[in-house]
Amino acid sequence: MTTSRTAPPAPTPRRRRRWRYLAGLLVLAVLLVVAGRVAWTWLNPLGERAIDRSGPALLQSIKDMSRYEAATGSFQVVVDLEKDANFLPDAVKGSRTLFVGAGSVDAYVDFSTLAKDAITVSEDRTRADVRLPRAQLEKPNLDNTRSYVFAQQRGLIDRVQDFLSSSPGDQRELYVLAEKKIADAAVASDLRSRADANTRAMLEGLLRSLGFTKVTVSYAGEP
């Protein structure tokens, strides 16, 4: 006994049109998503744009320099500043901030303080004796591009105060502490003695190039 199979009915024109509409809608949806993403990236409605409306810098004064910059020291310090409330836990009131401060300190010899007899020259102009003041240290110069807050913990009240403040996250105290610590480190280092040695070498080379065969450079306090 044989059975005959009937072929499936061919899709009607109406069904074919329905599938074409559906495929066209899917393609259109994909194109709209891609176009929207491209437009969002290009327009970036939530992005920020920095506009510098500052005026030109004004020259206020010019001062003649009479000192020799003899050495520069680079320093880095980690400031660990903690503030606690007397009767509240740290989670409610208190803060702890780790701040990395990086900067430099210049050492210089001030020639404007030289006494009249600080430089003596022999009659035959072959010998020169120079007596200089000791090197001094400039104020630390913090590098803003390398100084930053490494970590910070704040209590609930501190977070609310920063949110309501017109200048949240004020870091001036951190910069002041970093400058003080770098200044103390510069004083404890050999930066000034290095500046004294560099100044002595500079003057000896300069005076010998002028024809002096014997040059003595000494500092205040030296025998």
Image (cartoon, grey):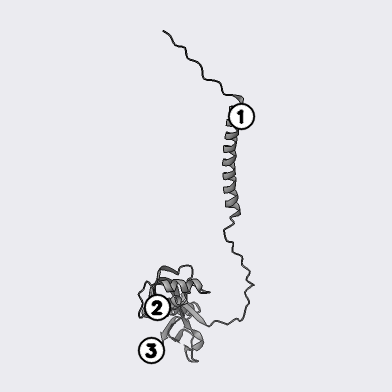
SS label for mark 3 = loop
Of labels 2 and 3, earlier in sequence is 2
Of labels 1 and 2, earlier in sequence is 1
Residue 32 percent across, percent down from the top left: 59, 44
C-alpha span from label 3 to label 1:
104 Å
**Residue drawn 46% across and 72% down?**
160
C-alpha span from label 1 to label 2:
80 Å
- Which numbered marker is on residue 181? 2
SS label for mark 1 = helix
Q: Amino acid at mark 3?
A: Gly
Q: Is residue 29 left or right of residue 108?
A: right
Quarter occupied by the C terminus? bottom left
Residue that badge 3 annotates: 221
Q: Amino acid at mark 1?
A: Arg
Residue 92 percent across, percent down from the top left: 39, 73
Label 2 or label 3, whichever lies nearer to me, is 2
Near-viewer residue (123 or 13): 13
Can residue 162 be seen here? The reply is yes
SS label for mark 2 = helix
Q: Amino acid at mark 2?
A: Lys
Label 1 or label 2, whichever lies nearer to me, is 1
Residue that badge 1 annotates: 17
Near-viewer residue (26 or 138): 26
Of labels 3 and 1, earlier in sequence is 1
- In the displayed structure, 125 sits above or below 171; it is below
Q: Is residue 62 left or right of residue 197?
A: right
**Residue drawn 57% across and 38% down?**
26
Label 3 or label 1, whichever lies nearer to me, is 1
Quarter occupied by the N terminus? top left
C-alpha span from label 2 to label 3:
28 Å
